[in-house]
Every structure is written in structure tokens, then in C-alpha cells.
Amino acid sequence: MVNELKVKTKTIRLMVGFITDIPGMDGIVYYARPDLTLGSGFGTAISIQCGPSVQEELKKAGSAAVTDVVVTGAGNLHFKYILHAVGPRFQEEDIEGKLKTTMLNTLNKAQELQLQKVIFPAMGAGFYGIPLDVSARLTLGVAREFLEKAADPKEVVFCLRDNRELKVFQEQLQKM
């Protein structure tokens, strides 16, 4: 199965691992809650690994609407920024449209910050209930379209939690 797609001079790459452990990235994407509180799972990991500075920055920001992206520093992590993308939840109205907009807004923010390498989770899959195949189809599609026109980022990585997630993303990437 394929784990990489070239889009002109840029790359979309798939990998399995824990997103905060991946070296060489400029920015990391966190699928955030509208209240911008670092929740359980990946949010807890960010909170512990970054130290208190990230949650303090988020408190100053207040809250965000679905499709908004709030940028913070990365605290003790080896990234420049964390892009807190507030995406839709399962059974919310217009999930697909909102997920596409969230992904596009996140990539636009990465370009604005001149990030060369940005890493995403399986956006909305898992706790927030977006079906994995929907997440893969929409986020990979938006990433490919964006990279065809944009100068930055040069590399978009999807860091998936396990081989089950990887397989779904690989199947979608193969169709592209």
C-alpha cells in the first residue's frame, strides 16, 4: 500500500505513531473543542508534554467556533506551533462541509505562518465520531487540492494511531 503522494513539489505522507513524538515538524494540529480546553487523550498529552503555557494561551483566546483555528506556541514540545482546529462532531449538521472548511482553514493558517511541515491526526475520527473513511476522504482531498496551488506547506503528514487507521487512509490515498 502507498504511504506517500507527490503533489507537484510537495508531499502528503502517512505514518503511524504518536503525533507529539514525530521529529522535524514545524506545526502540529490538534482537533480542538470549542471551549479550547485541552481534553482527554491527545489533549492530555499536549497539556502534560507542553507544560501549562499552551492552556494559558488558550484561556486568553477564550473560545472558538466550529471551523476556526487558534494558534499557540508549543511549550516544551519540539514544534513551533500548535494549530487548534475546531472541527465538527458526529451527527452535527453538514459534517462534511464543516470538516472540509476546518481542514482548509488549518492549511491556510499553516501557510500564513510559513510552516514547511505540518502534521495532522485523523481529523475528527475517534472520540468526536467522524467516520474514519469520511475523515480520510475529505482531509486527504482538501490537502491535495491545497498543495496543488499553495507555496507552503511543503509536506503534510497524517499521523495515525494504528494500522487500522493507516489502512483506511492508504486506501483513500491510493484512489488519488
Image (cartoon, grey):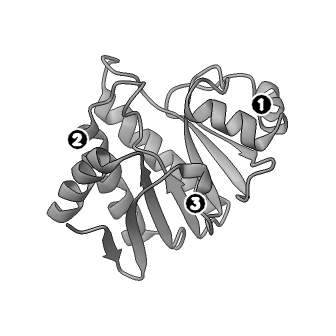
Placement of the N terminus among the 4 image quadrants: bottom left
Q: Are marks 1 and 3 in contact (CB under 8 Å)?
A: no
Q: Residue furthest left?
A: 175
Q: Position of residue 91 (x, y in %)?
A: 30, 17
Q: Give the residue type at disc 3.
A: Ile
Tell me which residue sits at (24%, 58%) in the image: 170
Q: Eyeballing the image, is 121 above or below 87?
A: below
Q: Which residue is mark 1?
A: 55
Q: Are marks 2 and 3 in contact (CB under 8 Å)?
A: no
Q: Label 1 to label 3, Cα distance in Å?
A: 21 Å
Q: Position of residue 124 (x, y in %)?
A: 40, 33
Secondary structure beneath label 3 = loop
| Foreground label between 1 and 3 | 3
Q: Label 1 to label 2, Cα distance in Å?
A: 31 Å
Q: Which residue is mark 3?
A: 22
Q: Which badge, 2 or 3, comes first in the chain's sequence?
A: 3
Q: Eyeballing the image, is 105 above or below 41?
A: below
Tell me which residue sits at (81%, 34%) in the image: 57
- Tag on residue 133? 2
Q: Give the residue type at disc 2.
A: Asp
Q: Which badge, 1 or 2, comes first in the chain's sequence?
A: 1
Structural crowding at the residue carrying mark 1, measured as other residues with C-alpha within 10 Å and reported as few (<14), some (14–19) or many (≥20): some
